[in-house]
Image (cartoon, grey):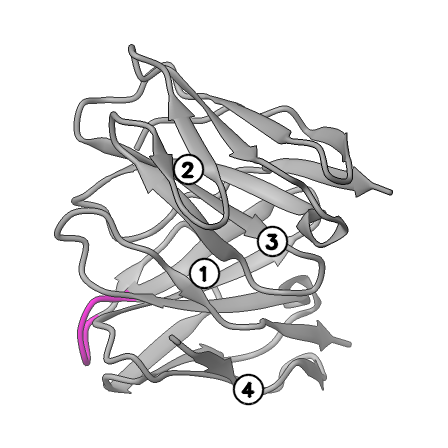
Amino acid sequence: DVKVTQSSRYLVKRTGEKVFLECVQDMDHENMFWYRQDPGLGLRLIYFSYDVKMKEKGDIPEGYSVSREKKERFSLILESASTNQTSMYLCASSLPATGADEQYFGPGTRLTVT
Amino acid sequence: DAKTTQPPSTDCAEGRAANLPCNHSTISGNEYVYWYRQIHSQGPQYIIHGLKNNETNEMASLIITEDRKSSTLILPHATLRDTAVYYCIVRSNSGYALNFGKGTSLLVTP
């Protein structure tokens, strides 16, 4: 079974702190994604990566950066956390979309910025 | 990717079939219809996808109309564990990311 793991289920940080959210997948997938989920807004794509050291901005990249140094790991970085970044963060991975593909999601990290 | 429209909520009695409709009237020829669901406090889970033909797997059936402008996800014998938000997503094979809308909240009642 595909497994996508995220470093923390719950995280509390202070405003201005630098925050790292880690995601690891064990199925040798090329594509990895970071989404955030907020009530009433559904899932929104922050960044995605289709290869090591490659990244593309999603719909809401402002205030975030990402790092993909190894194929299995995709990190989301909040350079200076703010209260409006309090949210559920979801990581996903998939094989390249040569036809149809399935995205496999991690359990999510609920981040609270105080 | 084409936009989808789903009802915000629906309910179903346990053991009965749950039918979840989705409208995607602007779908283009190379776009697939995907269904995912999200159980409370968990990450989304892939259910099924299709292009033109109806599809069935161990979780559900997907019925796509002949003009491809709408589809229905069918859970043949809903259980309480099927209570979740169900997302209908349309995307082409050239895209990388899934565009999740607000989905349909399904409540399965005893």
At label 3, which amino acid type do we have? Answer: Gln
**Contact (CB < 8 A) between labels 3 and 2?**
no
Question: What's the distance in space between the residues labelled 4 and 3, CA to CA?
Answer: 29 Å
Tell me what residue is drawn at x 60 percent, y 76 percent: A81
Q: Where is residue B76 in the image (x, y as percent from the top left)?
A: 58, 36
Q: Distance between the residues labelled 3 and 2?
A: 13 Å
Chain for disc number 2: B
The magenta region covers: A49-54
Which dot, 2 or 4, sits closer to the camera? 2
Mark 3 → mark 1, Cα distance in angstroms = 26 Å
Instruction: Please state the chain letter of the residue tagged with numbered disc 1 in the rendered image.
Output: A
Residue at mark 2 to residue at mark 4: CA–CA distance: 34 Å
Q: Mark 1 points at which residue?
A: A62
Q: Which of the marked residues, 4 or 1, is nearer the chain's N terminus?
A: 4
Q: To which residue does mark 3 refer?
A: B38
User: What numbered label is drawn on residue B96?
Assistant: none
Q: Are marks 4 and 1 in contact (CB under 8 Å)?
A: no
The residue tagged with tag 2: helix, strand or loop? strand
Q: Is mark 4 on a helix, strand or loop?
A: loop
Q: Are marks 2 and 4 in contact (CB under 8 Å)?
A: no
Q: Mark 4 lies on which chain?
A: A
| Mark 3 vs mark 1: in front | 3
Q: Position of residue A79 (x, y in %)?
A: 49, 80
The answer as to whether the residues below labels 2 and 4 share one chain is: no
User: At x 67% / y 62%, what residue is drawn?
Assistant: A84
Relative placement, left or right, of A38 versus A34 is right
Q: Do the residues marked 3 and 1 share a common chain?
A: no
Q: Decide whether the magenta segment is chiefly helix, strand or loop.
A: loop
The residues bearing labels 4 and 1 have C-alpha atoms spaced at a distance of 15 Å
User: Which residue in the structure is indicated by mark 2?
Assistant: B89
Expressed as whole percent of the image width and height from the top left, the position of residue A110 reads 67, 72
Give the residue type that dot 4 points to. Lys
